[in-house]
Image (spheres, coloured by chain):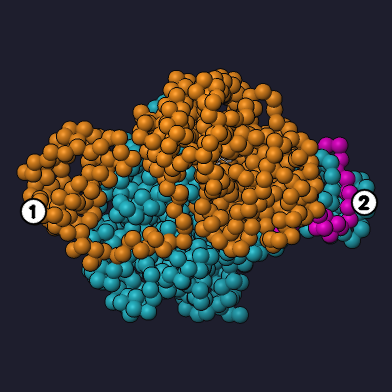
Chain colours: A orange, B cyan
Amino acid sequence: MISIHWKPDKNSIVPLRRQIINYFTDKISKGQWPIGSIIPPQRDLARLFNVNRSTIVAALSELKSQGLIEGNGKSGTKIISSSILDLTKSQPDWQTYMREGIQIPNYKTIKTINDIEWDDKIIRLSSGEPSPELFPDGNMKKIVNKVSIDMNNLGYECPHGMYHLREEISKYLKAQNIDAAPSSILIVSGALQAIHLISIGLLQPGSSVFIEKPSYMYSLQILQTLGMRRLGIPMDHEGIMAKEIPKYVKKHRSSILYTIPNFQNPTGNVMSQERRKELIKICKEEKLPIIEDDVYRELWIDNPPPDSLKSLDKSGNVLYIGSMSKALSPGLRIGWIVGPDSVISHLADIKMQMDYGSSSLSQLTVAKWLSTGLYEEQVDFLRKELRIRRDIALNALNKYFSNMATWHIPQGGYYVWVKLKGKINMHKLFEEGCKSGVLLYPGYVYESNSNTNIRISYSYASHEDIEKGLHILSNIVQRLLHD
Amino acid sequence: MISIHWKPDKNSIVPLRRQIINYFTDKISKGQWPIGSIIPPQRDLARLFNVNRSTIVAALSELKSQGLIEGNGKSGTKIISSSILDLTKSQPDWQTYMREGIQIPNYKTIKTINDIEWDDKIIRLSSGEPSPELFPDGNMKKIVNKVSIDMNNLGYECPHGMYHLREEISKYLKAQNIDAAPSSILIVSGALQAIHLISIGLLQPGSSVFIEKPSYMYSLQILQTLGMRRLGIPMDHEGIMAKEIPKYVKKHRSSILYTIPNFQNPTGNVMSQERRKELIKICKEEKLPIIEDDVYRELWIDNPPPDSLKSLDKSGNVLYIGSMSKALSPGLRIGWIVGPDSVISHLADIKMQMDYGSSSLSQLTVAKWLSTGLYEEQVDFLRKELRIRRDIALNALNKYFSNMATWHIPQGGYYVWVKLKGKINMHKLFEEGCKSGVLLYPGYVYESNSNTNIRISYSYASHEDIEKGLHILSNIVQRLLHD
Ligand SMILES: Cc1ncc(COP(=O)(O)O)c(C=O)c1O
Ligand SMILES: Cc1ncc(COP(=O)(O)O)c(C=O)c1O
């Protein structure tokens, strides 16, 4: 049996599993652990490395798939080859396949966040989702139980999604002055999928998408992947500067506008009523379709935002996107698109081609939340809680950042967009944050060359952690400002 | 108030809603119903046309969105413009957007099936899903109720999907001699999404995908849309002709093989054990990756099929796809991909970019089906029922088609692949089937120039309807053979 005097580094951003794989590969390929050697049982390795058993299982599985080891944890795992090269000879060249695949990988920063935010101990000032503390545990149980009683066969759904859910959404939208029959509504698996469907359904390589600068859209790779261009249009405190649009339209054929009018991600900005009217008017004149991403609408803290662009749109210019993720629960993966019937049918056909529709269980559950009125109750609760959380974040910012940064007070949503007074190395800030156990989104994710902004989310971390996380960050920022 | 002496044609394949819209548009644009005229209330229209209220709501909504009418059903809807052209002036040119969007629409035949199969009265010899009669009503209720009790916060999941579900799938696969740690498994929203992810994650425009001829893959537009080629390789009774592969590989760089070894869609064919070994050997030599789509594995009627390609694969050549759709319920939208860890991580990243993961409710539900052992019970039940249904279909075929067609007896799965003895106009068969209330998939969906085959599914229609549907079809075929 091999003896091991090594431990993975828990403070590294390299995942534990990866560290273990690297260590083993190194030992084996250098011949330090010769072919035929027996590796200690999984349980012992877990104790030795002070990691979960599942991490060991994952690491050994990869070593197995590389052909380096064989056998299972119980009777002992044996080294059977000293070189991954042996295997590469017979394996497809996966690296090339992955590199050459059409879809561009996520930004490294986002990938890192996606991979490490599952660690319990980390403070997530990054996450755009309601905290587990805000999860409507009792009512969700009640509703899913009702669903279990009422449900029938869960077959493939019709292309637009479950009719009853579309009726409920239609009523719900009516209360927001949006007139949408069920046939004008498509159920999707969240707003992100809506963006995806619209992009592949209505745009082509070379198309241009006008977006706010900064915008959530900059954090996505979908347009790049498809050969489309993102064109940032400046914002002022009223929102995207609509009067700039005509000059862009003249230059770019086959384009569309994407906007987040309410509690914008990342700035928290709300588009004024005047600006909404102006935007609708200009886009109509320019025959420029609008994608209105309204996932944060419900999350106002002080006053409800103005009516949506969709409610002002009398000529079928606007594709309206909503979602259950931000106000109820992202794990349901339910959102919707509202638009002219013919466009919705076209997108429904494409949705069928991508995944044959969204989970029926999730659709039934969302329909019940709406029909019972419990959704309204949850949103009310959320608003009150978000006010408390926002104020905790603002207090902590005042306490720790007042000399180093400025920010606007968000009137709703999840985010404070903090602008540092000096330039720092944002990648370093992100990395040191990770090492100190605090996750945030650096501004460059939302605007390629921003090296002064960070997005702070107050929706996820606990009250204490918001304060603690900002304290830790302020120390790092201070240090980096002096570098 | 306008008076109407017209009814939609219930036997037409044009949806009722569309017929009503066309009728109204025609009347209005010809000035027969002048501006200012009042349209009868929705309830009256529904009675007059003998359609659901929801159909009227949908039709009026589209007319509204075209700017032809205004107001709601109660106080009376008014005609406000005589020409959709008026509106086109101010509306974006949606037709052009739709035509030029990247994604190719579904085949017209498939679109028609997707749109009309929701009609209760139609006999669905088309559907590749278990009949509502086979839905495990009691156990599904029990399990979803358990899920409601146990569940916690439904937040965004980690990129690979819920860990606990991956553990359960790992155990499940172990019983099938597939060694896959949770880190080698990616949860997806059904096998169709798996195909989508693999295509955009690992292939590029110009890539070639080798498939069986005929194959389910021919019914999808994803590869075409992405600029990839489908190359059909002939099958014999043992499955895809593996020895043909090397000569194709030489001609086509950056390629992958897609196969459905068990109860293939559409032929019902099972690949022999010998052929599996040969295929694995040849693909390894050629370094050709394999996508093994194994969604029908559980549905054997007579004997279990041979072990999967994945279980024979010692060098990480195979990406293995499974799904809950065929053996449990498609509305759950849960499937999985198994492959080398690095490839799975890459695909997980892409899945995050497409929809941030699959429904947590569905994931919890599937995990419970597996962990309680009730899944095995359901599959046992399904096998017995499929045997009965297959035999009903075979009897009816013997009775009505023995002079006109040949077929193999499927050993499992859902389909009989019926080969007509003469050539007929398949489009006509499909259309006349629709008109007579029987849906089927014509062979050309699975092999572009097939005008002799039809795919008959015995999984969905009731016992009586299988017999009745085949009877009706036989009359149509007979007529067309004589044309
Ligand atoms: C502006 C915006 N749109 C869409 C999404 C995606 O939401 P969903 O969970 O509905 O896909 C987010 C969440 O991060 C967002 O901030
Ligand atoms: C061979 C094959 N693969 C994949 C699918 C899609 O199944 P899912 O519902 O898991 O997306 C089907 C169903 O039609 C099929 O026949």
Q: Amino acid at mark 1?
A: Pro
Q: Chain of mark 1?
A: A
Say which residue appears at 25% left-offset and 68% top-offset: B284
Callout 1: few (<14), some (14-19), or many (20+) C-alpha neighbours within 10 Å? some
In this image, A10 relative to A439: left or right?
left
Q: Which residue is mark 1?
A: A34
Image: magenta residue range: B74-94
Would you call the spot at circle 2 few (<14 residues within 10 Å), some (14-19), or many (20 or more)? Answer: some
Q: Quadrant of residue A414?
A: top right
Secondary-structure class at tag 2? loop
Picture coordinates of residue A151, whole percent (x, y): 51, 36
Question: Which residue type does callout 2 highlight?
Answer: Ile
Q: Nearer the viewer, mark 2 or mark 1?
A: 1
- As for residue B402 lying within the magenta part, the answer is no
Query: From this viewpoint, is residue B117 visible?
Result: no
Quadrant containing the C terminus of chain B in the rendered view: bottom right
What's the CA distance linking mark 2 and mark 1?
Answer: 89 Å
Quadrant where ligand 1 appears: top right
Residue A97 visible to an observer of this rendering: yes
Q: Which chain letter goes with mark 2? A: B
Q: Nearer the viewer, residue A198 or A479?
A: A479
Residue at the (59%, 30%) spot, across then down: A407
Q: Is mark 1 within 8 Å of ligand 2?
A: no
- What residue is disc 2 on? B35
The picture places residue A318, in percent across and down from the top left corner, at: 71, 48
The residue at the point 84 percent across, 48 percent down is B69
Q: Is residue B347 above or below residue A278?
A: below
